[in-house]
Image (spheres, rainbow, N blue to C red):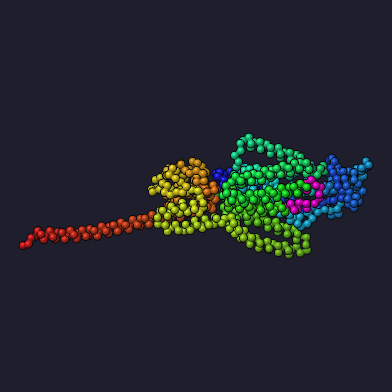
Amino acid sequence: MDNLPAPRPVERAVHAICALTLAALLLVIWAPVVKVLDLTRADLGADGVWIGAYARRVTGVAPGGAAAIAGVRAGDVLQFDPGRDADWVLAGYRAMPAGFSASLPVRHADGSRSIVVLRPDAVEYLPTLNDRLALLARLASLVIMTLVGAVMVWARPGLMTWSLLASFVSGFPVRVYADYFLAYAAGPPPSLLSVVPPMTLSLTVAFATFALSFPRADSAWHWWKSAAGGAAFLGWVTYLTVAAHVAPFERPVIAPGPYRAWAVVTLVALLLAVAGFVRRYRRSDEQLRARLRWALLGMLVALGSFALYLVFFALPFAVSSSLSGSMLTPGNWVLAVASGILFPVSFGYAVLRERVVDVQFAMSRTLVFGAVSTLVLVFLTVVHWLLGRLIEHSGIAFGLEGLAAIGLGLVLHRASHHVNLLVDRVLFRRHHAAEDSLRRVTAALPFATEAQSIAEALVTEPVRSLELASAALFQRDSPDGPLLRVRAHGWNRDHAASLAADAFLVRYLQAEHQPLRLQDSLALPPDTPQGAALPVLAIPIVNQHVLTAVTLYGAHVNHTLPDPDEVELLHALAQASAHSYQQVKLATLTREVAALTREIAALRTANAQEKARSDRLEESLRALAQGPG
């Protein structure tokens, strides 16, 4: 569907380096979040509100809690010192050691002051195995999504794919990261890491940009629209960074006001994204709808799950003072399934098989196999790591670790085979059929005895098997002569009928003997077809280091470019045809020699017969000359 030219390798490399750098930086920042699996926090048994720097007014005391036992009452003000690590624990930030107790200054409601000793209760941040698994599943899904986004930027750099990557990045668990940051990394001075959550929060608006540009590789916006959009986005990032950064001892973990503003803006962006997808679908014809259906289904499920998570889980948890992260567990499962399974499967199916976005010019089956196998390996490795974490507390950890390692090895061995088989059958089934057809044609070429059969194999068969919009075969009669068009599909009489011997394309193919992607208009012959039929690939046919023919192929009928595997198939077909041309020439010479031999034999027979008649005539004349006497 994307009819833009393939990006240049240098352009793809630059964008890929930037995308991978961003992805690696974010993954390094977020990876330590798994420490919250062991986080145990201090519960004072008292509710309160922050009223200034490092002071918290108690609004309610739980009977029998640590605050009640220490004599703290409603209306008292607890005074914290950010320079004391014990006060970080009492405030519910740091992990609470076993048997912990600490003193804290208190300003009572009557104006008196005292020092109270608090022995808080321990509260596990993720108390159940289900809570831990849900967080790990969500983190694994975000790793998958980030890698998918980086690959898309590499394959088709542009506004659409960068917006897709930014949308994926915005799904990182911000409140969980804030809890990790306060528990393990934060200190009294301001830290740059405290502004990471609001910066990623701001990227949720990229959902709308992605929907407006999908499935094109770029968006043809006027410069003033792009400038206005960029300025609005920078203003939005600045607002969230200033207003929503993590500030311990002063307010809740994340300020409720900016977080609610973010929720509203995000919901608007999600609605705009859904509207953009629906609009694109309704304006498409039935054939395009069939191709878009899988991609849009996965995207709508992902957007819907994100909106559900935002309204029912993220927003209530972010503005709460809960010491436990179990409130997010159902939402983490929703995002893990939608973002880590449903969306990658549907989007990958639409991109790789239906070619809704043209990335296959840069992605071969080997790359896809490697990427999918790597994702499966990452998932199984995370499972193995989690299993090790659960086993290490048991008394038979050594034996169970050994069994787990053996089991993981067996699973990886079997999983790799089945994953490759599944990818081959589901995503590349059409490619398999085309590959088998062209391989049969290639195998039959050495037995061709007519140039017409070779032309049909080079033009008609690839067009039929690979669903190409055009193909044309140019052939020369002499080593230095022009190449004349002898067979074509998608070309008419008004298009170029020959390639000059001195044309750049001919000279390049004569020098390199390798397929050439026609990204430069200077390499194209004059008067070529346009649209999907525009030649995008030139395959040389070389016999004994001499360029004898050139085949020009257009894009697929859906405007997508041939992928590396298809180019290799066409190149193999051209190499087989070079030998076939030699066979045809030998067969032609053999037939010509046989015809000449028959002609000579016939002439000899005719000469013999003529000589016999001449001899008889001579005898008759001699007899007449002698007369009767």
Residue pictured at 12% horizontal, 58% vertical: 621
Residue pictured at 84% horizontal, 51% vertical: 42
In this rendered view, identify the residue nearer to me: 422 or 572.
422
Residue furthest left in the image: 629
In this rendered view, identify the residue nearer to me: 154 or 467.
467
- x and y percent of residue 491 in the render? 46, 46
Residue pictured at 84% horizontal, 42% vertical: 50
- x and y percent of residue 439 in the render? 49, 57
* Magenta highlight on residue 325: yes
* Magenta highlight on residue 76: no
Give the number of marks. Answer: 0
- x and y percent of residue 600 in the render? 27, 57
**In the figure, is residue 358 to the left or right of 399?**
left
Residue pictured at 7% horizontal, 62% vertical: 628
In this rendered view, identify the residue nearer to me: 53 or 317.
317
In the figure, 457 relative to 521: above or below? below
**In the figure, is residue 16 to the left or right of 70?**
left
Tell me if residue 163 can be seen: no
Tell me if residue 391 can be seen: yes
In this rendered view, identify the residue nearer to me: 394 or 287.
287
Quarter of the figure with the C terminus: bottom left
In the figure, 378 relative to 265: above or below? below
In the rendered structure, which segment of residues is drawn in magenta?
317-332
- x and y percent of residue 520 in the render? 51, 42
